[in-house]
Image (cartoon, rainbow, N blue to C red):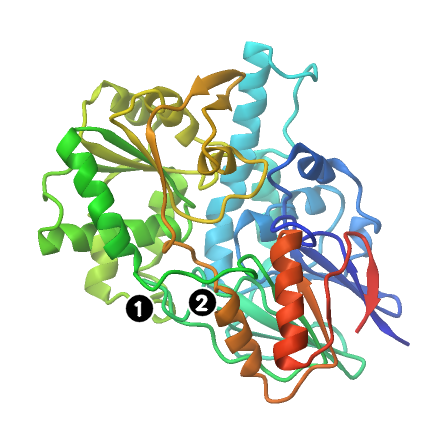
Amino acid sequence: MSVNITFLGGTGTVTGSKYLVRHGDESLMVDCGLFQGYKLLRLRNWTPLPIDADQVSAVLLTHAHLDHSGYLPLLAKQGFSRHVYATSGTRDLCRILLPDSGHIQEEDAEFANRHGFSKHAPALPLYTRQDALDCLPLLKTIEFGKTFQPIPGWRATFTPAGHILGAASVLLEVAGRRILFSGDLGRPDDLIMNPPASAPAADTVLIESTYGDRTHPTEDVIAELGPVLQKLAKRGGVAVIPVFAVGRAQALLHAIHQLKLRGDLPSSLPVFLDSPMAVNTTHLFEHHQGEHRLSSKEALALTHAATMVSSTDESRALASRHGPMVILSASGMATGGRVLHHLALYAGNHRNMIILTGFQVPGTRGATLASGGKSVRIHGRDVPVKAEVVQLQSASAHADANQILAWLRTMPEAPNQVYVVHGELGPSDELRKRIKHELGWRAIVPEHGSTWPT
């Protein structure tokens, strides 16, 4: 019997990663992510899967970012009740991210109903905080490098992928086939995360392509961020930095702390981390010491690098402060969360800055800002953008095209087939061409919903 993969997400887009592997009567899902960005994509979150949730025998998570884990509460709500296998770092982050995701969806639905700007009456969340809490007991942790059986006769192994705490590539072995899922690959030169481990041998590879058509600049985020914040401090403005609460928030905190230690920024420059999720994640770096580059002293310093803002009252109180100051707040693409309130308040003043720190999915407010949009729609109204918008080119947590190819070259032998996933169509196709021409391997970009053999 053959082994097939159905691409239920993460194809033609960097969101919604879900790969359904089938052999005989068994089905296993690698990643279980939410679609984000364009409304056309977000509507897919409401579309039933082509398989009943209770027919999925197991789920493997490469990491905890919502575009890879955020559909889990809904899958469980639909009847999935078996194990979700993940590393301990991914489990710890899912305990933070998933309830927060449900909470934000409830808040957004309540806000839409209160202000009447939703076309639905009433607007409903995709799932609730309680739904997310209910799915957490399904998580079962597996150590890096330990081979286990998610389904009898199926073998799986997690190897470090860098990127964020707990992030893994997954080697799945079933019916004599070896399938390697890269997950999101980190950069070998990441400011705080360890580099990805070498790729194991496999017959079929699913490779991410977020930056499949570009390379990162050689300067690091500290060198790029320093002059930006120096300029802000001199003119007394407020910098709003939409951050991914897991990974980039901590990298930015570390960079700002280093700039202050060097004297490149005044030590008195107020910095606020306004995201309970990011605050909780920052403390996890002390508990996962082997996965990142920070010493125990540096990991502890992260928790003191900013004023940690947890309550909504503390968040609202920031509005009464004057600049200069720096506010880091989730979400990283300004799709929801507290950062929207800060953008609505500060985007209209030319003395202020909006600093973008990572890939901005098309269709998000972050992408609108990055493209020079003169206004951005927040909570049903158009907010003019007069603040200076800066997009850091060195802050990404993803490997670039050259680094992805270098990782593929670490494979002991050439695979039979490469599927290029987790990228917009342009970057995915560009990486496909490079894999074909530079490595001489068969590579395709699968369509959403298509099924291919391994």
Number of residues whose C-alpha sits closer than 10 Å to that of mark 2, classed few (under 14), some (14–19) or many (20 or more): many
Q: Is mark 1 on a helix, strand or loop?
A: loop
Task: Give percent across and percent down for residue 194.
Answer: 38, 70
Type of amino acid under label 2: Gly
Q: Up-down: is 360 above or below 166?
A: above
Label 2 – label 1 distance at C-alpha? 10 Å
Q: Where is residue 426 in the image (x, y as percent from the top left)?
A: 63, 54
The answer to which of 229 and 166 lies nearer the viewer is: 229
Which part of the image, by quadrant, shows the N terminus?
Answer: bottom right
Task: Report whether 189 appears left or right of 150.
Answer: left
Q: Left of 228 or right of it: where is 411?
A: right
Q: How crowded is mark 1: few (under 14 residues within 10 Å), some or many (20 or more)?
A: some
Along the viewing direction, whichever of 122 and 319 lies nearer the viewer: 319
Q: Can residue 303 be seen in this view?
A: no
The residue indicated by pointer 1 is: 293
Residue situated furthest bottom in the rendering: 412
For residue 428, what is the image quadrant?
bottom right
* Residue 430 shows in this picture: yes
Residue 288 position, x and y percent, is: 36, 64
Residue 425 place in picture, x, y as percent: 67, 53
The reply, left or right, for residue 400 in relation to residue 109 is left
Amino acid on which the number 1 mark rests in the picture: Arg
Return the residue nearer the eye: 387 or 268.
387
The circle drawn on residue 162 is 2
Question: What's the residue at 50%, 74% (across, down)?
Answer: 144
Q: In which quarter of the image is residue 385?
A: top left
Judge whether 225 appears above or below 376 on screen.
Answer: below
**Residue at the farthest right position:** 1
Q: Sequence order check: which comes first, mark 2 or mark 1?
A: 2
